[in-house]
Amino acid sequence: MSKFFKTSDFNRILRQMYPNKTLAYSMSKKKYSSNSQQHQNPKNNFKSKFNETSTRFWLLASCAIFGPIFYTLTTPTLPKVEKKKIYVDTSPTVEDSEPAEFTKSKLPEEIVKTSTSKTVIKDTVVDNDGRKEYPYIDYILVGGGTASFNAMISIKNLDPDAKILIIGDEPNSPYQRPPLSKELWENKEQSKDFDFNAWDGTVQSIFYKPESFFEMVPKLSAKTSSEALNLKNVGLLKETRVGKLDLKKSLVVLENGYKIRYGKVLLATGATPKSITALAKLGKNENIQTFRSISDFKKLEEKLNTSNKLLVIGGGFLGSEISFSLQKRNKNEKDNAKTVHILQVFPEKGLLGLLFPEYLSNYLTKKLVEFGVEVKTETKIESVEFNKMSNDFKVTLENLNSKKKEVVQVDQILVSAGVQPNTDLARRSGLEIDPNNGGILVNAELCARTNVFAAGDVCSYYDEVLGRRRIEHYDHAVKSGILAGENMVGLSVRK
Ligand SMILES: Cc1cc2nc3c(=O)[nH]c(=O)nc-3n(C[C@H](O)[C@H](O)[C@H](O)COP(=O)(O)OP(=O)(O)OC[C@H]3O[C@@H](n4cnc5c(N)ncnc54)[C@H](O)[C@@H]3O)c2cc1C
């Protein structure tokens, strides 16, 4: 008895599978049946079978049933490129859901006990003088950026019922800034919606969540009643600046005078780009800009439609990224013919010269020059004059070694000369500012005063290993935001 798979076995199996004749069966019979059988009965070939009505019926049925299966099996599997827009939410623990669907994570007992948001349940609180009522919110996050967003996520994960209000002065919901100087310049069409192609092939949005995620709080004024701020979950108050904190009464005071009482408050006000002295005397000029926000991106993009020569001042990360990205766009645009000459000027010996060793900095400079950007190293901007008639600038440059001067003409200037932390609000509130690095002084738990926390670019925190520091980086904004959120809820001892 043979254990090998033979043609006859195959035919038998086919016949059992398809008791009536199918194309597959017919074909298999033709292919696999012994030649002898066909030779014995030459008329009984495929053509004559095809003429039989039943065969024709089964032919069509087989095509209908097996065609798609065959197509599926034989089509090569292409790498899956997700084209659905993704909202990037950097928190590792967040549920990607509408606020109402936040999973009620089981809170460790000690958190429930220490969570002060549970102790105050009134929506409005009468002021000490008994005359004014202020709306009460468990957690107020000042600044609508990365640190605030991540604090909100960690608070929600630990205290799902908490009412949280994010107050930001930008017209957008929270978003990530890094793509503004990189990926968003790659595809004009996509960047209209602030989408970009991420390194993993997905199309992402720079916004962490769609606007529908937040309860949009209408503009508040000193006269708005406290009922107007009746939040159910996570509220977002846009285009609104916080003026100060009243630490004694636990109040957030908006610049327009409206007051909200907080359980805990986070200051995550980020940083503002600096300018340079040579530009100061020109005052506000439409063709000079810094670069930090979506509005700055829109402005630069619009200006480049008419600009011929852009001066980028600064040799750090941001200036170098922008020079590279704009030159890349120039190259992509070569057929459309609208290109902008880019001149980058900075006092260091090479790109990122304050951060990288000299050989690496030199290498990067060489690469950027080869790419088509005009770079002037070890050069300072001595003076800038604006010509109203020709709507352009006469910029005097000085080489720091040779002291030689030269004058260049540009019609657009982008200053990327570092940032300073936004501490005005903290100063006005009586909080301590680090005299060395300029940030809001907080301890290792990111706490400045009782119930007052700070995170992100603006905070000067104590690192148990590395000592006091302030960091202007994305990852830090994410992590310090998460930590601040956890500590605000009351998880003071982290596992
Ligand atoms: C173009 C660009 C590219 C970058 N690329 C990188 C990168 O590749 N890698 C990296 O590590 N870092 C990068 N960074 C830095 C990184 O984005 C920041 O470190 C990070 O955004 C800091 O987050 P934050 O929440 O502290 O502050 P922000 O994101 O600046 O948010 C603070 C918000 O608070 C608002 N605000 C300030 N004062 C008030 C007030 N009184 N009332 C209400 N709102 C107020 C501000 O307007 C702002 O919207 C980049 C930055 C920029 C601008």
Image (cartoon, rainbow, N blue to C red):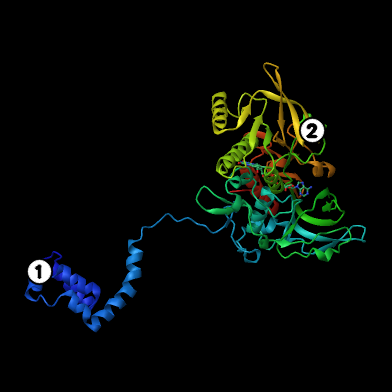
Residue 58 x, y percent position in the rendering: 27, 79
* Quarter, ligand 1: top right
Residue 494 x, y percent position in the rendering: 61, 48
Label 1 crowd bin: few (<14), some (14–19), many (20+), radius 10 Å: few
* The quadrant where residue 18 appears: bottom left
Specify the amino acid type for callout 2: Phe
Q: Which residue is mark 1?
A: 35
Rendered view: 104 above or below 347: below
Q: Which residue is mark 2?
A: 386
Q: Does the residue tagged 1 have its C-beta within 8 Å of any atom of ligand 1?
A: no
Which comes before the other along the chain, label 2 or label 1?
A: 1
Q: Nearer the viewer, residue 138 or 285?
A: 285
Specify the amino acid type for callout 1: Asn
Label 2, label 1: how far apart the Cα atoms are: 94 Å
Secondary structure at badge 1 equals helix
Q: Nearer the viewer, residue 96 or 245?
A: 96
Q: Is residue 452 visible?
A: yes
